[in-house]
Amino acid sequence: MSSKDQNLSTYNKDNCPSGKGMKIHIAISEWNSDITLKLLEGARSALIELDVDPSNIEVMHVPGTFELPFAAKCLIKSHNTDAVICLGCVVKGDTKHDDYINNAVANGITQLSLLSDKPVIFGVVTTNDMQQAIDRSGGKHGNKGTEAAVTAVKMVYATQQMNNPKKSIGF
């Protein structure tokens, strides 16, 4: 389902694990800051609602969306983090610049997550125009930052469950 058909901020807290004890880092692009700061607001609010201690939420600002994978790599290497949320905004322009940025960032985040064994969450708004970005950063389609935060908590929880399987008797 596309984001135009749903609200990105809608989730059922009762169906989400607790984020208690989790350390979450957020890498945020300064480019299109009117959008990315709203994404950050949504992410922080959701993390706190899911019981992540505010002192366990750290933010790193980078110049643009293209720099997010490298920032996430630095955060994983130098901090004791359970997950990194990457927040950015790329709006289509007159050239194919957005295609190159979006593909590079998506691939970088995917590779980093696989290689680091840490959830690295793609919280990048990729739109055709600024109105679509507004709609997805707290507007009529909710907030992609909220969605990214919920995803981070769920993925950390899933990772913890896989790394600490329940013991069973039998074969």
Image (cartoon, grey):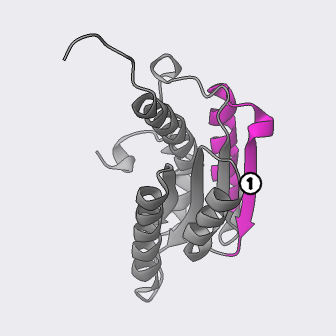
Q: Residue at x 57, y 58 (%)?
A: 86
Mark 1 packing: few (<14 Cα in 10 Å), some, or many (20+)? Answer: some
Relative image position of residue 162 (x, y in whole percent): 40, 32
- Residue at numbered disc 1: 59
In terms of secondary structure, where does tag 1 sit?
strand
Task: Pick the quarter of the image with the N terminus.
Answer: top left
Q: Quadrant of residue 45?
A: top right
Q: What residue is shown at x 55% (from left), y 68% (from top)?
A: 69
Q: Residue at x 28, y 10 (%)?
A: 169
Instruction: Check the picture and name the quadrant holding the C terminus.
Output: top left
Disc 1 residue type (three-letter): Val
Q: x, y percentage for residue 70?
A: 59, 71
Residue 147, above or below 104: above
Q: Residue 133, position in %: x, y?
A: 53, 60
Most distant residue in the top direction: 169
Q: Who is closer to the viewer here, 7 or 73?
A: 73
- Which residues are drawn in magenta? 34-63
Residue 35 in view of the camera: no
Q: Is residue 92 left or right of residue 59?
A: left
Using the image as rendered, state which of residue 16 and residue 167 is in the foreground: 167
Residue occupying image coordinates x 41% and y 65%: 111
Residue 167, visible in the rendered structure: yes
- Residue 106 falls left or right of residue 47: left
Residue 130 magenta-drawn? Answer: no
